[in-house]
């Protein structure tokens, strides 16, 4: 393994000294940027155990099985969560089916009112939800507070507005609900993914059975409480917790009309096979290996922030993470030097500290996956830059953010989704080369383009195989904007007018 460390980490660096400017590494180690701890003080109530939310009430799982949900920053058990068996899934689907006629026949503006109420309750309970998300998932509190929860509420507000305007979404056609929707979500944005799924389904007059990921069930269960609080009719939203077998029971249930899945490409493939011989509608939001392309005329300091935001946000547990960085050859050394400086100031550690930039890895399994990619990167000859200086807590699952140079397109770390804080840096000479290298991936979820030239922005963007292209920014999300991929990143869109069509029949 070849490792390049930067000066403040105590080892020599072969790179030239950066031009005179404020040395962030020296500043942070010298004390002028030292932060006092700023721990979040709210501790929401967490029950010792949770049931399944079926037909408007929490019920015990039929098989009586529960599993622990833990805080990945401390490895301590937060609660015991119910494991839904096929018979529980059956009960949830029946509840959703029974609720469907009345819910879909409700005047649309009345449906919209329920969505507004849920959105407002999410806002009112925002702090509690943010803390819960951070405790259960390991993401920094500033991200759950400023991104996850506000966006979750925004999705309900946005879709509340659509409920009585659906005919504008399908001009010339009569929109009808699809029916009972089975929705399966991952652990990286638990409440936000639940909101992405539930809000449009309900606005369009469908009922749902949703399964959160097994490591992050708690905020979905709080959302179930909120549905009950706002008086949502029984059975319209059902939340069943469990792992892959519970998800599979939803996918294979004959009473389901549509499957909406967000998760990994291998599981998406299995679901596509299971659904293919049926009449179920399907949308798949899968993995990615997105390209962030920096041209020599880009505003470099801004681009460096975009690189950081692109790959280290949420510990890199982001489907559209800018995990492949393509830098124009003429500025490669400057970008690497600036990136090293900036990363030295990233604070990794206690997710409940409001100053933390990078929190805990979501699970032991995910940490071991990331470590196996780091081993592959080292073994295959890329150069790892370990520039982060934070001391890591003694317990919990941690991975310091790092980046690799000397990466070949054939390297594992350049091809496969790592879903962790690991960046592969590569270079290009011309716009055409940038496009062909960016498109050289089985995935097609997102991309970023950084340049001062408007014409280059539009020319490059239109040639990229990516469902989302950010221009001079990265990882910006909005409920009005459709999100989804091409190729092995899946099909179907969530958000915006396009996202509604996945929940409507129009023929
Ligand atoms: P995963 O595929 O392992 O699990 C996702 C969900 O599917 C979980 O709830 C899991 O319990 C369930 N599941 C597992 N096996 C199943 C089966 N056989 N049948 C039905 N359900 C099953 O993915 P993950 O590790 O939870 O999430 C990470 C992945 O999700 C990454 O690949 C990431 O890129 C992707 N993701 C995509 C988007 C997007 O919008 N494209 C958004 C977030 C995450």
Image (spheres, rainbow, N blue to C red):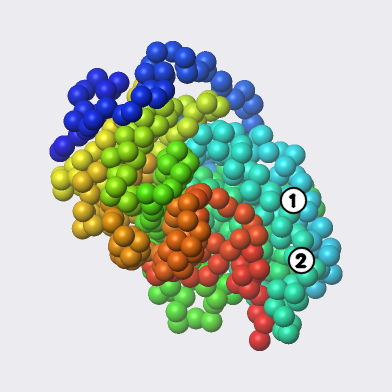
Q: Of label 2 and label 1, which has the lower sequence position?
A: 1
- Left or right side of 78 for 298: left
Judging depth in this view, the residue of 315 and 481 nearest the camera is 481
Residue depicted at 33% across the width and 28% down the height? 19
- Pointer 1: what residue? 118
Please name whichever residue, 397 or 499, is drawn nearer the observer in this view of the structure: 499
Q: Which mark is residue 505?
A: none
Viewer-closest of 245 and 223: 223
At which x and y percent is residue 394? 36, 23
Disc 2: CA contacts within 10 A as few (<14), some (14-19) or many (>=20): many
User: Decide: marks 2, 1 in contact (CB < 8 A)?
Assistant: no
Is residue 12 toward the left or the right of residue 113 in the image? left
- The residue mark sitting in front, 2 or 1, is 2
Which percent across, then down, holds residue 3?
20, 34
Q: Indicate which disc residue 163 carries.
A: 2
Kind of element beneath mark 1? helix
Q: Residue at x 24, y 20 (%)?
A: 10
């Amino acid at each position: 393994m070849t490792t390049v460390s930067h000066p403040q980490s105590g080892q020599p660096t072969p790179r030239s000294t950066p031009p005179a400017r404020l040395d962030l590494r020296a500043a942070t180690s010298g004390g002028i940027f030292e932060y006092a701890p700023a721990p979040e003080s709210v501790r929401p109530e967490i029950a010792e155990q949770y049931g399944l939310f079926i037909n408007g009430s929490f019920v015990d799982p039929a098989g009586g099985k529960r599993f622990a949900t833990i805080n990945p920053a401390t490895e301590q058990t937060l609660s015991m969560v119910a494991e839904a068996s096929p018979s529980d899934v059956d009960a949830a689907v029946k509840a959703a089916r029974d609720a469907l006629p009345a819910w879909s026949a409700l005047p649309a503006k009345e449906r919209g009112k329920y969505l507004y109420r849920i959105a407002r309750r999410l806002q009112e309970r925002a702090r509690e939800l943010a803390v819960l998300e951070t405790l259960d998932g390991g993401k920094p509190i500033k991200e759950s507070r400023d991104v996850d929860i506000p966006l979750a509420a925004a999705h309900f507000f946005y879709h509340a507005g659509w409920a009585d305007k659906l005919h504008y979404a399908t001009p010339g056609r009569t929109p009808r609900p699809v029916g009972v929707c089975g929705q399966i979500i991952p652990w990286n944005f638990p409440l936000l993914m639940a909101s992405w799924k539930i809000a449009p389904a309900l606005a369009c007059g469908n009922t749902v059975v949703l399964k959160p990921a097994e490591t992050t069930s708690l905020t979905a269960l709080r959302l179930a409480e909120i549905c009950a609080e706002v008086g949502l009719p029984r059975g319209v939203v059902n939340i069943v917790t469990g792992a892959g077998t519970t998800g599979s029971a939803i996918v294979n249930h004959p009473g389901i009309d549509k499957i909406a899945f967000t998760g990994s490409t291998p599981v998406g493939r299995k679901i596509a096979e299971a659904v293919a011989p049926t009449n179920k509608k399907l949308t798949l939001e899968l993995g990615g290996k997105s390209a962030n392309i920096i041209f020599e005329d880009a505003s470099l300091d801004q681009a460096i922030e975009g690189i950081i935001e692109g790959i280290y946000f949420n510990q890199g547990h982001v489907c559209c993470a800018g995990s492949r960085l393509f830098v124009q050859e003429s500025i490669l050394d400057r970008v690497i030097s600036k990136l090293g400086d900036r990363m030295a100031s990233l604070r990794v550690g206690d997710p409940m500290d409001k100053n933390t930039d990078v929190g805990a890895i979501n699970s032991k399994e995910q940490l071991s996956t990331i470590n196996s990619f780091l081993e592959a990167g080292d073994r295959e000859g890329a150069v790892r830059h370990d520039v982060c200086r934070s001391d890591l807590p003694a317990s919990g699952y941690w991975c310091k953010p790092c980046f690799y140079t000397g990466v070949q397109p054939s390297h594992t770390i350049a091809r496969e989704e790592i879903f962790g804080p690991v960046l592969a840096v590569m270079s290009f000479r011309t716009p055409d080369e940038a496009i062909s290298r960016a498109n050289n991936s089985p995935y097609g979820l997102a991309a970023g383009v950084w340049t001062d030239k408007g014409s280059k922005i539009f020319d490059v963007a239109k040639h990229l195989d990516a469902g989302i292209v950010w221009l001079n920014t990265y990882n910006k999300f909005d409920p009005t904007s459709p999100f989804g991929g091409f190729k092995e990143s899946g099909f179907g869109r969530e958000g915006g007018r396009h996202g509604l069509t996945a929940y409507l029949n129009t023929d």
